């Protein structure tokens, strides 16, 4: 097998900025069930026709160390096919980390065989074919920026705060660094953000080199080395050194900017969330656009927006409380008007301003009451029945099907309150429900 015991055919290591290359197809296979499973995990779905292709040399980085595999196109005999993902075989055994951030096979140990998943039938590609490989550079470069920013952040958290990195994940939207701490101060993370951006502005050199295991050990890096072979060590000037098989930019200035996004708890640790590179600049522009539009909407300056929003929220809470107080009063007076001078039963069809909840609350103030209310609400019918005092002898379960039949309604409840809903029905069927209810209450 090519590649084994050699890095020279892994062009993504020798020239990380190379975007296209000529190569020869060395092997074509149907994808295995395991590979199909891996693809469905990393891509969400697997196209109908996919084959696994090995090339004599490649610029495609195979997924590992929390960094996704490269994608792009391959052209063979004038036909172009999509390379949807790249994974790795290791000593002829699939050895891909199943967990995001699992770096066991990504310390740059030898024996990596990148497997390219090409979206076409296996019959269209043959061993010996001349091929031209082209990277999806935007995709790759975004992850080079993110990955380098992650080294910066992990290195700074370790050197400034003594905080170790447990796992990392590089995603399309952000990067996360899980740290071995149950709690983390926001102010500490802002300090790390500042230090990371200082390093970006300083344009520090990022270098990658293969060292023997003992040479690497002598560096006393922040994380112990997971393989016992030679390792690839990635250094950011004298700020950080770590064994890593991933892809990085050659200068920290290419990370452009590093933004702290917040933190969340995970397995008793804290996961810190960050943005970097082009994605971070895009986020700044998007945020700025939102602020600009909100300012125009409120005729306000950015620093006034929080006060305005807070005041609006408080007045909304007050308005809602006032509305429900008035709704309750209205429901009571409607019930009183309807039951005045006759048996304590009433039935209503509510308009859109009234809600069933007010009627259910209002019903609490009556000792004897049979109440039915129906409301049309965005394409469906909501119904409420209250049977209190002497009406409690009506067994709802016994009259349920006769009562709800005209509405085709579902629902139930416990004495004295029953409620539910129905699909849209006619005014006549609502009227029939209410007549049926009045008749039932009249017999009680
Ligand atoms: Zn790395």
Image: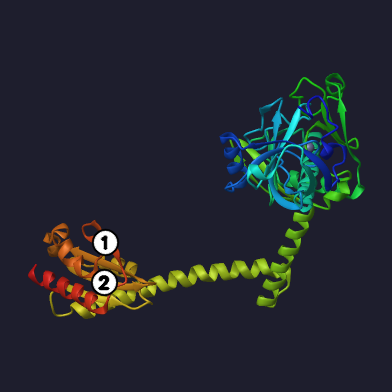
Mark 1, Cα crowd under 10 Å, few <14 / some 14-19 / many 20+, is some
Percent from the top left, x then y, of residue 331?
Answer: 30, 74
Residue at figure coordinates x 75%, y 60% from the top left: 282
Residue at figure coordinates x 84%, y 53% from the top left: 256
Mark 2, Cα crowd under 10 Å, few <14 / some 14-19 / many 20+, is many
Local secondary structure at mark 2: strand
Image region (quadrant) for ligand 1: top right
Please tell me which residue lies in front, 82 or 108.
Answer: 82
Q: Which residue is mark 1?
A: 410
Q: CA distance from mark 1 to mark 2?
A: 15 Å
Position of 147 compared to 370: left or right? right
Disc nearest the viewer among 1 and 2: 1
The residue carrying mark 2 has its beta carbon less than 8 Å from ligand 1: no
Residue at figure coordinates x 77%, y 53% from the top left: 138
Q: Quadrant of residue 422?
A: bottom left
The residue carrying mark 1 has its beta carbon less than 8 Å from ligand 1: no
Percent from the top left, x then y, of residue 186?
Answer: 70, 46
Q: Which residue is mark 2?
A: 373
Please tell me which residue lies in front, 257 or 26.
Answer: 26
Percent from the top left, x then y, of residue 96?
Answer: 66, 33
User: How many numbered badges does the structure rendering display?
Assistant: 2
Percent from the top left, x then y, of residue 340?
Answer: 18, 79
> Quick one: quadrant of the C terminus?
bottom left
Relative to 313, say whether 32 is above or below: above
Local secondary structure at mark 1: strand
Q: Earlier in the sequence, mark 1 or mark 2?
A: 2
Q: Quadrant of residue 280?
A: bottom right
Position of 59 compared to 353: left or right? right
Please tell me which residue lies in front, 110 or 281.
Answer: 110
Residue at figure coordinates x 75%, y 30% from the top left: 112
Position of 405 compared to 110: left or right? left
């Amino acid at each position: 097998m090519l590649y084994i015991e050699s890095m020279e055919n892994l062009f993504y290591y020798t020239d990380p900025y190379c975007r296209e290359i000529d190569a020869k197809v060395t092997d074509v296979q149907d994808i295995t069930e395991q590979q199909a499973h891996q693809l469905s995990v990393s891509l969400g779905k697997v196209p109908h026709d996919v084959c696994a292709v090995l090339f004599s040399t490649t610029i495609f980085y195979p997924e590992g160390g929390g960094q996704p595999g490269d994608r792009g196109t391959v052209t063979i005999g004038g036909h172009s096919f999509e390379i949807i993902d790249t994974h790795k075989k290791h000593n002829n055994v699939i050895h891909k980390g199943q967990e995001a951030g699992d770096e066991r096979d990504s310390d740059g140990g030898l024996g990596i065989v990148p497997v390219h998943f090409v979206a076409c039938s296996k019959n269209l590609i043959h061993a010996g074919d001349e091929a031209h490989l082209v990277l999806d550079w935007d995709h790759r470069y975004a992850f080079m920026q993110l990955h380098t920013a992650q080294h910066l952040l992990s290195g700074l958290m370790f050197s400034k705060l003594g905080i170790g990195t447990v796992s990392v994940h590089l995603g399309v939207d952000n990067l996360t660094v899980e740290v071995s701490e149950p709690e983390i101060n926001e102010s500490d993370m802002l300090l790390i953000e500042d230090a990371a951006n200082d390093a970006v502005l300083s344009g520090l050199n990022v270098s990658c080199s293969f060292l023997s295991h003992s040479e690497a050990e002598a560096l006393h890096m922040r994380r112990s080395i997971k393989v016992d072979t030679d390792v690839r060590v990635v250094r950011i000037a004298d700020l950080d050194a770590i064994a890593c098989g991933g892809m990085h930019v050659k200068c920290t200035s290419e990370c452009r900017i590093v933004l702290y996004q917040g933190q969340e708890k995970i397995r008793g640790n804290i996961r810190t969330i960050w943005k970097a590179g082009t994605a971070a600049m895009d986020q700044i522009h998007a945020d700025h656009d939102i602020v600009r539009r909100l300012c125009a909407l409120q005729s306000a300056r950015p620093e006034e927006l929080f006060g305005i929003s807070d005041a609006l929220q408080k007045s909304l809470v007050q308005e809602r409380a006032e509305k429900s107080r008035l709704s309750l009063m209205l429901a009571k007076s409607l019930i009183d008007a309807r039951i005045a001078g006759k048996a304590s039963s009433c039935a209503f069809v509510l308009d859109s301003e009234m809600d069933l909840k007010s009627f259910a609350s209002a019903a609490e103030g009556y000792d004897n009451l049979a109440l039915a209310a129906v409301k049309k609400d965005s394409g469906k019918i909501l119904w409420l029945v209250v049977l209190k005092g002497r009406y409690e002898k009506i067994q709802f379960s016994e009259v349920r099907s006769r009562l709800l039949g005209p509405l085709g309604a579902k629902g139930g409840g416990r004495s004295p309150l029953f409620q539910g809903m129905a699909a849209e029905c006619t005014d006549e069927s609502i009227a029939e429900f209410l007549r049926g209810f009045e008749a039932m209450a009249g017999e009680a």
